Image: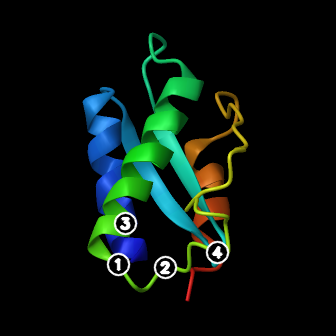
Amino acid sequence: MRTRCEEIMRKVCEDFEAELKEFNGERDHVHLLINYPPKVAVSKLVNSLKGVSARRIRQEFTGQINRAIMHGHLWSPSYFSASCGGAPLAIVRQYIEQQKRPL
């Protein structure tokens, strides 16, 4: 499911002329490193990433997702976004790579 989620999110990024550089996460959340153009509003990108992935994951993994856990939602309505323009990309990638992978 995690691999499919990454594929879906990579395609959404392409639609926004953005590039998903790193994808990882834990059981209950994901970490994304995205290079996106200045014309893209982060809120619109995140909304699309969450919306498209939720629809497709639910369609493709029907029966494996317990809707009661998130009150019918795959993702939480919140998200965290940070700019890393000043940090070396290698350091940010290392942080994401060291996160636990979902089971």
In the image, is residue 76 above or below residue 47?
below
Residue under circle 3?
57
In the image, is residue 78 above or below residue 103?
above
**Residue visible at 57% across and 81% down in the picture:** 102
**Labels 2 and 4 touching (C-beta < 8 A):** no
Image-based side of 55 in relation to 38, left or right: left
Please state which of the two labelled residues, at mark 2 or mark 4, is closer to the viewer. Answer: 4
In the image, is residue 72 above or below residue 45?
below
Question: In the structure shown, which secondary structural element does the residue marked by tag 2 occupy?
Answer: loop
Q: If you read the primary sequence from the N terminus, does the residue marked by circle 3 or circle 1 appear first?
A: 3
Q: Quadrant of the C terminus?
A: bottom right
Residue under circle 4?
68
In the image, is residue 7 above or below residue 32?
below
3D distance between C-alphas at marks 2 and 4 = 9 Å
Residue 74 position in % (x across, y down): 55, 62
Q: If you read the primary sequence from the N terminus, does the residue marked by circle 3 or circle 4 appear first?
A: 3
Q: Which mark is residue 62?
A: 1
Residue 64 position in % (x across, y down): 43, 85
3D distance between C-alphas at marks 3 and 1 = 8 Å
Q: If you read the primary sequence from the N terminus, does the residue marked by circle 2 or circle 3 appear first?
A: 3
**Labels 3 and 4 touching (C-beta < 8 A):** no
Task: Classify residue 87 by image quadrant.
Answer: top right
